[in-house]
Image: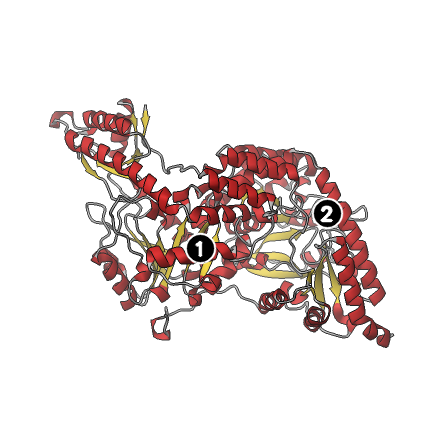
Amino acid sequence: MSTSSSLPRSSPRTVDDPGTALRYELMDEADGISDLISLGLGDPDLPTPAHVVEAAKAAIDAGLADVVGEPAGLPELRTAVAAKLRRENGVPATSEGVVISTGAQEGLFLAVQAILRPGDEVLVPDPRYPSYDTAIRVARGEIVSVPTYEEDSFDLNPAEVVARITPRTRMLLLVSPGNPTAGTISPDHIRELAEIARRHDLIVISDEIYEKLLYDDTEHLSVGSLPGMAERTITVNGFSKTYCMTGWRCGWVAGPEPIMREVARLKRLTSGCAPLVSQYAGIAALEGPQDAVASYLEQYSRRRRTVLDTLDRLGFTYGQPRGGFYVFLNAGSSGMAAEELSRKLLSEAHVLIFPGTGFGPSWSQYMRLAWLAPEEQIAEAMARIERCLAPRAEAAH
Amino acid sequence: MIDLSGDRVTVTTAIEVREAAKSALDAGATHYTDRPGVPELREAVAVKLAEANAIAVTPADEVLITCGEQEALFLAMQVLAGVGDEVIVTGPALPADVELVRMVGAAARVAPSDDRLRLDVEQVSELVTDDTRLILFRSPSAVGEVIADSRLDRLGALAIEHDLRVISVESGEALTAKGVEQRSIAAVGGLAPRTVTINGFGGVGLDAWRVGYLAAQRELMGAMRRLKQELSICSPAVSQHAAINAIGRAGAYNAVLRDRFDVRRVALELALMQSGLEHIAPRGGVFVFVKPDPAISIPVAIARAAEAGVIVADGVRAGAAGWLRLTLDREPDLLRHAAYGLASVIGDVPAEAAV
């Protein structure tokens, strides 16, 4: 039982925002709908590759999952991650410069805490996933939003970055492919941004969690591979999106060893080592066959086509989704704000799509649609949306 | 060499727990779970807290499953303390607890324990200032003292008097001697609205699986729940399913552990008494503390012990400066042997041999 008089005096520090609250409200409402098709959360519906699950089960049987390890992660996994970064990304990583985190999001949080001093400014693309803001606020840094635009398919324009650099700018955050936009930063822009970072002595955090999910010959360039960048770049990635391993909570952060030693210290204080069973699964994911990844991408490509064809027919505009598994669509063409459209689609079509306000207050015209449901459900969802909105679309024409 | 310097005890999981985890993986527990935790696990935690700790919480919004106890502690500290705040860490204090207070930007004030490494509530009281917001408290303490006597009530009264919050870490609960009464501070009158209780499943072997929990009334819970989502989204799915199976086995598991460590504790304590070494054998935890002859410094004592074939740790790692820390995670014969070995090198030294 609590009474107001016995409550502690200052209210707990909150990391609340209205966009997140709305997302929770919609999820609560969706809970009660039996034939709901959710295109909301970024949790792949596809299974973790079978050989990865088997490796985890073998580790459990051998008792390996019971033994607490170093906060920085299993040496074998750190070595595998460093090898992957050198081989696939051209990033000159060392195993000592890799820390295994409890999901990529925690890895990014730790890197931000390790680097930022109070008052440091961080350049962050807008729109973005809200956990970046939390990481920066907790470190008492200042968030400087860099706008991206639908007409550029949400590519990050180096000129917009330069225009916001001040003597207090310490860090540039790159997310490519992005969430919620699914936009990518072109290799040319990555090179320009690297040059800017070198010139202004900035640390770059590069979130590459969606790097394997690319469409239409889109190219991924890791900024940490460019000349003079290894010493100022922190690369964040994980297993969740590439290998459909969201529930395992395992990711990594890689960069210069002195920074990574501080990241490991903070990792110990924040949550200790990442779950051992998941770390053994991670070793299997990186070192085993990669054909599952190609198969996921094939399926996502078909779903993407279905979604984009429907949006085109309905007259919605959007940034080209070049990577990941989302499209950030402009709800404006429906004549409704995104929140209103989200509510309408949920109540009438039983399809859950999040409004863009969860990714920044200025995105009330946009919605993030995730194609993370089986193909027949995606087709059904698109048909329902079309039935729900077609009369309106016709009237508008 | 007998190595008694270990920080932790590895408890292996039961076969049934492993099978439950593997079945969950086969059934597709590879996705995000409900953000605050799998509902069935939150239910089980609420039942455990009600039955074993007299803490009443609703599973829906007053239990949060975390990536182990350390994440629970981080979330609570981050939300309840910040720049300009003072946090009292009751001694003996783990160095990592002090480090964590500093990590969130608050000032750590360690309340010294008494000369027998026991919680001293007077020392806590003397540290309270206008800036004090929070008490970080462990029972069993960092050295393993179980605090269930009137000091718990006095600590609670102090928190109410000065309007402080309390983080109570109770993860050593599974490893206490037989017959020792335990009490949770959240169950002390008036403390529930201001206490965050933290525990986990280390006693059933799930330490490395990274699953634990925190419980608090909903007024305190909201911000911790949101920060958890922004930090690690949810806790590992397979580990939560392992915990669902393990939580029902905790009683039987703990009884076995208790018996094993009781035998070891008694064996070591007797040998230390016979050897005439000053020592403390708390009724909880897995450590015994030994004081070298005053003429011998701790680093010298550690070096001499090693020469005699016994590796011991500096007690400062458990907040016990001036003491040596010995783990009980060895068979009784080895512990006895170690005690006699230690006595020969760090016991009473004639004045002329003092260093």
The residue furthest right is A397
Going by the picture, which residue comes out furthest to the left?
A: B351
Q: Which residue is at 85% across, 77% downward?
A: A395
Q: Quick check: can you spot residue A370?
A: yes
What's the amino acid at mark 2? Answer: Leu
Q: Position of residue A214 (x, y in %)?
A: 75, 47
Location of mark 1 (residue) = B44
Is disc 1 surrounded by few (<14), some (14 to 19) or many (20+) residues within 10 Å?
some
**Amino acid type of the residue tagged 1 in the rendering:** Ala
Using the image, name the chain to which the residue with label 2 belongs: A
Chain where mark 1 sits: B
Tell me the SS state at disc 2.
loop
- The quarter of the rendered structure image containing the C terminus of chain A is bottom right
Question: Where residue A175 sits: x, y (%)?
Answer: 66, 52
Front-most of residues B304 and A389:
A389
Q: Residue at x 29, y 55 (%)?
A: B183
Res. A333 in view: no
Q: Position of residue A362 (x, y in %)?
A: 66, 68
Question: For the residues marked 2 and 1, what is the alpha-carbon distance in whole angstroms?
Answer: 39 Å
Disc 2 target residue: A213
Mark 2 nearby-residue class (10 Å; few <14, some 14–19, many ≥20): many
User: x, y percentage for residue B88?
Assistant: 31, 56
Q: Say which of marks 2 and 1 sits in front.
A: 1
Badge 1 marks a residue whose secondary structure is helix
Residue plotted at (61% across, 65% down): A31
Horizontal relation, residue A249 to residue A306: left or right:
left
Q: Is residue A30 left or right of residue B143?
A: right
The reply, left or right, for residue B296 in relation to residue A265 is left
- Which of B159 and A240 lies nearest the eye of the viewer? A240
Q: Quadrant of the N terminus of chain A?
A: bottom left
Mark 2 vs 1: CB contact within 8 A: no
